Amino acid sequence: MEKFRPNPEIPREEPTPEPEMVYHALNRKKEKDVLAEFTPEQQAEIRQKQQTLSSLAYFIGKDFRIPVELNQPGAGWHWDFKENVIRIDPKDLLEKPMDYLRFVISHEGGHRRISRTDFIPLEEWKQPGFAFMMNAIEDPRDNNFVAESYPKFRDQMDLAYKQDLDFEGKAKEKAAQKLGYQPRFMQAGFEYIKQWFREVQGQEMEMSADLPEEVKTVVRATIEQARDSWWRYPSRKEADKSEELIKKYAQVSYEINRDEIWPEFKKLIEADMEDQKTQELLKDMQKDQEGQEGGEGGQGLPQELKDKLTPEEQEALEGAIKKAIEDAKKEQEKKANQETGGKDKEGSPSDQEGAPESASVEASTGKPIDLGSLPEGLKQKIKEYIDSLPEDQQKEMTEKAEAAVKEFEDALNEELQGKLSDNPEKKAEREEKAEPGETKKVPAEKTEKGLPGVDTEEMKKYRERIAKELKKDANVYEKMRQEVMPLIDKLETELREIFVARKAKGWKSGFTTGKRIDIKRRIQEKAKSVPAMESKAWQKREMPDEKDYAISLLVDLSGSMSRENKIEETFKAVIVLSEVLNRLSINLEILGFNDRIYEYQDFGQPMSKPIRENMGGMLEEVNDTGDTGKAQWNDDGWALEKASERLAKQKADQKFLVVLSDGTPEESSMHPRSKYELGKVIKKVLQETDIRLIGLGVGRGTEHVGEYYPNSIANVKVKEMAEKLAVLIKEVIANYDNF
């Protein structure tokens, strides 16, 4: 699957439905109340932009029954699953650029179009952290779909992302206020989104420096799987064609998340739960402390815990508890003043309807303590105390911790701009609360007879056929990779041994200064009465003779490569090279050619699932051999010149251009022999650049390769392509100066 592949069917202009189509389902009374906060001029601007965005939401979401309503000012944007409504923030309509607004509404429409979760078991969804993990991967998945299906929104996506960079900061502030620490699962989720954005920007993975090491470990272990998941979405045509196909893609993405990401991600949740249990205990201690101060018989710190603490630790803990109580009271007083305008209108704040009875009542629910402010030794002793509690008390504390983490997670999901399809947990809750005989809301795709959501026998058969096709397409690269995996592992090991040997750093004696001393030599000098000032026993580190590499692989995709399994075996060879060199972080470019050049992996581009899937296209490009087909040509000279120009721009000490071809040049009219004769191009590259050229002749009758290329292997047996290329790469890296 190619990233953001152009779609010729995209309309030039955004469609504009009739006004009644836009507003037929809007809650007029509610919106009138929202608009009352704005001036008439602002109201007119909000309405105009709302209509434009509604048209766009309908167009992308393909659901003309979904209204686009005004949310409360400052409440953000989201798709309300219960009501099947997209709500937009009127403040944003006034304050943010139109490109930003277009993408955000397109994003929400994209969720309506491709996000599905009905198949997720409720017990899985209820697990703390699971929904946020799903959300953090679904948002990039949705963005990828929108940007690929409607490429003009790609630049707007970049703008929207940059506009919302402050969301993470706000989430961290909320975490400090609600939990008293930064949950690891939240940090990991945001890191996935950051890495996705780096990927679509063409940047290499670079972990955020401020992440805890345990979060970095989980993200590193799962980022490739996350990438795999967020590139699993239907094309625009597929989404238009079948609801079942949309669900199939969503299910594949979910299964990757569940099976390959969640087991690691869950470790962060478990660590967060331990912190939250500590926080729940500290809340109880706050209540006891308040009881002491109020003369209600509170006991403060449990004696069993006191016995474990040093006087300094006890003082630190009691001080943190006292501060939390004072801060909570201040917040309640501030809140009461805001509700009454700071004045006694009909009595004190506590006398007014709806006002808190007392600032301390609310405070007694416990304000989170900044766990980062407590010494590590103290936190460890608190955890040990919790582990020593009776089983029923531990169970109660665990339930409280889960509820607190889940509540915070729900708040994150509510505010995170992108959301999944209907949350199964909330959906189940609604159905349980429904009165007997009450009509339950049904997803829009299932409300009309004949729509793709109806699970008939015919649709089941169709779904099974599509599933098989998807599995077949997805496994082209993977199937062949499994066939050559032993060769991949072997070559990686051999090359790594070469690099390790080169990187081995030694020490050389004979210097009057240095970072360490040769003891044996100094003893010998002392025996000869050589003074310290004249000693040459000092050692300096020898720097290895290490060079960096840039390798370009140019693959013949002319029609003759379709015969005798040439392209299949050559593709395996390409897989070996790409997998090994990417594992070793060697700068690699993979190109194909016939009468044009196909870019599969660019220099500096990290290997990813979309690249692997895109590389599978080599197997098809060779079949276009009609009268006007591109594969009937073999523009070796022109392709070599263009590939060498790209390679020459790379900053590397060792540059190799490896050409895999099975036939003599057959130039197209676009690249005439007079200008791009292969021998002349090769001579030019060798004279004007520092590139080493290597040619491999695929199959019999490729003696010409030896005639053109100074370093070459002709008549390589088709079945031996992968092995021969592996040996060649090992040789050129180990013996660069001989080429």
Image (tube, helix red, strand yellow):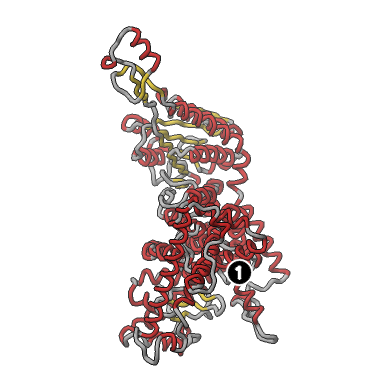
Is 97 placed left or right of 62 in the picture? left
**Going by the picture, which residue comes out furthest to the left?**
533
Q: Residue at x 44, y 65 (%)?
A: 322
Q: Residue at x 44, y 89 (%)?
A: 352
Residue identifier under label 1: 243
- Up-down: is 117 above or below 651? below
Q: Residue at x 46, y 82 (%)?
A: 356
- Up-down: is 564 above or below 210? above
- Up-down: is 449 above or below 512? below
- Up-down: is 421 above or below 679? below
Q: Position of residue 559 (x, y in %)?
A: 53, 43
Q: Amino acid at mark 1?
A: Glu
Is 116 placed left or right of 154 in the picture? right
Q: Nearer the viewer, residue 679 or 391?
A: 391
User: Helix, strand, or loop for circle 1?
Assistant: helix
Q: Position of residue 417 (x, y in %)?
A: 46, 68
Q: Residue at x 56, y 61 (%)?
A: 302
Q: Position of residue 428 (x, y in %)?
A: 64, 74
Q: Position of residue 649 (x, y in %)?
A: 34, 40
The quarter of the displayed image where residue 273 is located: bottom right
Is residue 104 visible to the viewer in this orientation of the structure?
Answer: yes
